[in-house]
Image (cartoon, rainbow, N blue to C red):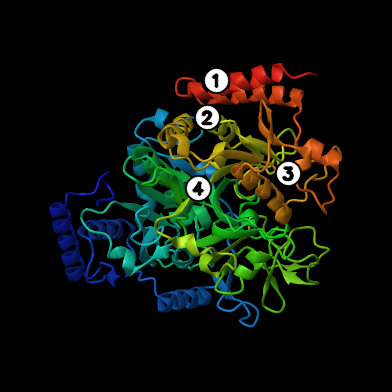
Amino acid sequence: MSILKSSVPEPRTAKKAAKAALRLVDADETAPTTTAPLRIDAGIAAWVFDVAAITQPDEIVWCDGSTAEWDQLTKLMISQGTLIRLNPEWRPNSFLARSDPADVARVEDRTFICSAEEIDAGATNNWREPGSMKAELLPLFEGSMRGRTMYVVPFSMGPVGGALSQVGVQLTDSPYVVVSMALMTRIGTPVLNLITDDTEWVPALHSVGFPLIDDAGNRIDDVSWPHNPKKYIAHFPETREIWSFGSGYGGNALLGKKCFALRIASVMARDEGWMAEHMLLIKVTSPEQRVYHLAAAFPSACGKTNLAMLKPTIPGWKVETIGDDIAWMRPGPDGKLRAINPERGFFGVAPGTGIVTNQTAVDTMWGNTIFTNVALRDDGDVWWEGLTPNPPAHLLDWQGNDWTPDSKTPAAHPNARFTVTADQCPSIADEWDDPAGVVIDAIIFGGRRPSTVPLVAQAKSWSHGVFVGATMASETTAAATGAVGQLRHDPFAMLPFVGYNMADYFQHWLDMGETLGSDAPPIFQVNWFRKDENGKFMWPGFAENSRVVEWIIRRLEGEVAARQTPIGGLPLMHEFNIERLDVTEDDLQTLVGLDKQAWLAEADETEQYFGTLGDDRMPEALYAELTKLRAGLAKLPG
């Protein structure tokens, strides 16, 4: 594949190009050395050497995904100052990375959807014309890897060879990215062996944009966290390409994650009749040993990982983890919606994850973990706000500065992360990597709402459920750059991740309902974050959210009723379990109640929001649901 072209060459042409490139490497002493395996798809080979000609790395390394490779790269980064090896007695085979303070979160304002037509990117995405975007990026990539190694990382999203899985190849000059991709995806030779002339694969190009040799041939000193002030994350949906420049952080650089698994995959899903969603997946077993699988969408840092690793407080219930962030869902041969977790690991927000809030996550990180931007204890272990009730007396903060409990700044960055494989999770379900996926019995939408939205409600129909997902809003968090604590619309928790027009995305959800018909799973909405007049959370949350899961399951079984209202089915007071909770009946009444005036205001705000998405593409079915909501509210007293 030529970096200058938009499509994979025909097989015969690709093979000729690859052979020519390989001959060039053999003959040209200035070409990068390479550890190319014996069997390479011709299209991949041509693309790799085309990129190398532009970026000019000293060496090309084809990653095999082995333990030896991991060990070699982590040792390399320790010598470079990128990683600090943690005390093996406390945290075996684990490392701390400190990023540059200017490279700590997703850069949504520098993230682009480069569809051929601007309307296809929609109002919620930054759009650039594909040709002009590549013309802007190519000069930045030219020579960007001089003095560095370019790593070729074949990766699979989902079990290797699975029917619901997809494959890609990432080129990167960051060893931190390679070892993180090894935790987050399946990488290496088994994936490369899958790719033939007929295989669809996503090319993902990444550079930190910090060459070690300048244009004049002078060597530049490296830094522990290389990056570039100019940052771009560009997606080309028609050609399924990803180009990322300038950032070495998380979702900007681990291109299998948000870039592929959501932005590009959402376009693939639209075109091919499936769904790529920002959703956790859990397996729930009731006291009667009946098994259910739930998919739930929450914005980043709003409790996804806590729910994915839930330890129920109510007797007899069991929750097991399938995935904590992304779900790919497709109608199965039986017509039911089946889902896989396309990721291999967890890239979780550390602050707020602790022995009180999420013991399972803490236990998952016992070793073999990369921590980024957390604090370092004097004994060589890590700490962050929320890990333990009381902080240590002394730490080195996420920037390496002395820190005590009297310090005015947090010890860990609010968006500090842990990266660890899912199979280390004590609550991992046996089905978590089943290539066939699991049948989804219910879908849950949630957000961070201090008022209006009830603790739990059941949508009245699939169309109403899509309306609920489309009208989700949440307080912003530290997972993205910008202000924290502001309320923003985040439909389906996909605002930063839909790779095409949001209104068309809503229509795709409605179309999926038509496809699934009577097999479509019920949809619920939850809100753990309701506050009273004093600003105190009314619901204890965390493990007690198992009580909400219990009510949802009992609704699926028909064991409890729901009070039908204009906003959906709400729990009956006597059927919702608050036994042994510090929640009064008055509190519960508020939590599962309906404030008519607040919802009328919500309806007005929703209409305004829908208007920002483009009336020419907004589905009429959602405006019809808004009309039904207002009509229902008008009939209520008060």
Q: Between disc 4 and disc 2, whose residue precedes?
A: 4
Q: Between disc 1 and disc 2, whose residue precedes?
A: 2
- When the figure is inspected, residue 147 is found, relative to residue 518, above or below; the finding is below
**x, y (%) of residue 439?**
47, 50
Looking at the rendered image, the disc whose residue lies closer to the viewer, 4 or 3, is: 4
**Dot 2 surroundings within 10 Å: few (below 14), some, or many (20 or more)?**
many
Q: Is residue 344 visible?
A: no
The residue that disc 3 covers is 529
The residue that disc 2 covers is 463
> What separation in Å lies between label 4 and label 1 (alpha carbons)?
27 Å
Mark linked to residue 117: none
- When the figure is inspected, residue 376 is found, relative to residue 237, above or below; the finding is below
Which one is nearer the viewer's eye here, 16 or 276? 276
Looking at the rendered image, the disc whose residue lies closer to the viewer, 1 or 3, is: 1
Q: Between disc 4 and disc 3, whose residue precedes?
A: 4
> At label 4, which amino acid type do we have?
Ile
Q: Between disc 3 and disc 2, whose residue precedes?
A: 2
The residue that disc 4 covers is 440
Q: Is residue 288 visible?
A: yes
The residue that disc 1 covers is 624
> At label 2, which amino acid type do we have?
Ser
Q: Secondary structure at mark 1?
A: helix
